[in-house]
Amino acid sequence: MLFEAFAAGGCRSYLLACESSCAAILIDPELSLVDRYRGQLQHHGLTLRYVVDTHTHADHFSGSQELGRLLGVPIVLHRLSSAAYTDLRLDDGDMLVAGSLKLTAMHTPGHTADSMCLIMEDRVFTGDTLLIEGTGRTDLPTGDPHAMFDSLFEKLLRLPDDTLVYPAHDYKGRTNSTIGHERTCNQRLQKPDRADFVAMMRDLDLAAPTHLTEALRTNMSGGKTVTQLLSEAARKVPFMAMAELHRRLDSNPSELTVLDLREKEAFEAGHITGARHLPRGQLELRVNTELPDPTARLVTCCEFGKISVLAAATLRDLGFSRVAALQGGITGWLEAGYPLESDLKNDTL
């Protein structure tokens, strides 16, 4: 068997192929790696038979739709997936066959209702259900900590201890684990009592994924790529130049509100003086309480000036008619020589 793992940030995807038939299966592809997948298929002379998402992703843009369109390959998800573009829907126990490859679906809801793991011989591809020394979160749409408890303790932990674990995410550079290692070392699996486990999951208080709204919209609808979403959003919003924002903040800072959409650590390390922190992933959840006046003048900013465009478009759709996006982002702001205020050092950068 040919086996190759790919990493893009914290996202992990897997290419499996039968060497005798050259039939291949790709699991959890990430949109930014589409050309790389195609290059590897061509390099090894492989024919992709299936592209599989272990669940409807909320934290990155799936490459399944693009690969399905380019290569004419069926897109596979669990039968409960709401993604309209799905070509083949699997139920618990269904098997995909490609040459000598045989992958059996195990329905493991909890992270999402449509989450499934794929079991093949000595390994299991766990999606976002079981991570290396962690588990998927259960606080996103269709998540359920009770279902996650059952999926982990009643299904995955019943696999042999030497079963290799390949998750859809890892942010520490680790490649794989085993069921035995997770049973012993995974702190979230040290809660074998259902009530304790559910309470732990509900108390995690995790930041929402940066691209939550856009990723879900794209991954569920079979609609648009990130480039298309940015292009559409840019047509809905005006921009504000860095020099103009700096002038307005210097002359009349109460005239407008700067919304910093980055995560807490980045915001505290350095932000535009007076900016309000509202992470992109929490925008829709907190906007009505954080920004009760839809007539207020707002300027969104992020690291590189892309997420702020999407957020500004979302705010305009929600009725905030005086929203602009900062052109260039915080990176451009610094490069232009404008100062940032640091909460960590209580000074100006």
Image (tube, rainbow, N blue to C red):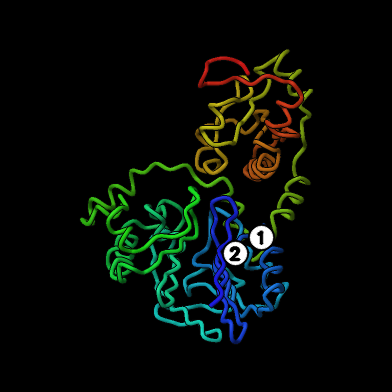
| Real-space CA distance between mark 2 and mark 1, rounded to the nearest whole angstrom | 7 Å
Does 278 sit above or below residue 23?
A: above
Farthest-out residue, top: 251
**Is 259 placed above or below 88 here?**
above
Q: Give the numbered dot on residue 33.
A: 1
Q: Compared to 193, does 114 lie above or below?
A: below
Taking the view exactly as shown, the residue that stands out farthest to the left is 193
- Is disc 2 placed on a helix, strand or loop? loop
At horizontal 46% and vertical 61% (from top left) the residue drawn is 167
Q: Nearer the viewer, residue 298 or 18?
A: 18
Q: Are there few (<14), some (14-19), or many (20+) residues within 10 Å of tag 2?
A: many
Q: Is 66 on the left-hand or right-hand side of 181?
A: right
Location of residue 313 in the rendering, given as x and y in whole percent from the top left corner: 68, 44
Question: Which image quadrant for residue 35?
Answer: bottom right
Residue type at numbered disc 2: Pro
Q: Residue at x 41, y 64 (%)?
A: 165
Residue drawn at 64 percent across, 64 percent down: 63
Q: Residues within 10 Å of mark 1 (few under 14, many from 20)?
A: some
- Answer yes or no: do the residues labelled 2 and 1 have beta carbons within 8 Å? yes
- Occupied quadrant, residue 11: bottom right
Q: Position of residue 236 (x, y in %)?
A: 75, 45
User: Of 156 and 273, which appears nearest the observer?
Assistant: 156
Where is residue 219? Give x, y as percent.
59, 62
Place of residue 276 in the rendered image (x, y in percent of width and height, measured from the top left): 57, 27
Q: At label 1, which amino acid type do we have?
A: Leu
Callout 1 secondary element: helix
Instruction: Name the residue located 76 percent from the left edge and 45 percent from the top edge.
Output: 234
Q: Using the image, tell me which numbered label, if any, was put on residue 29.
A: 2
- Closer to us: 318 or 108: 108
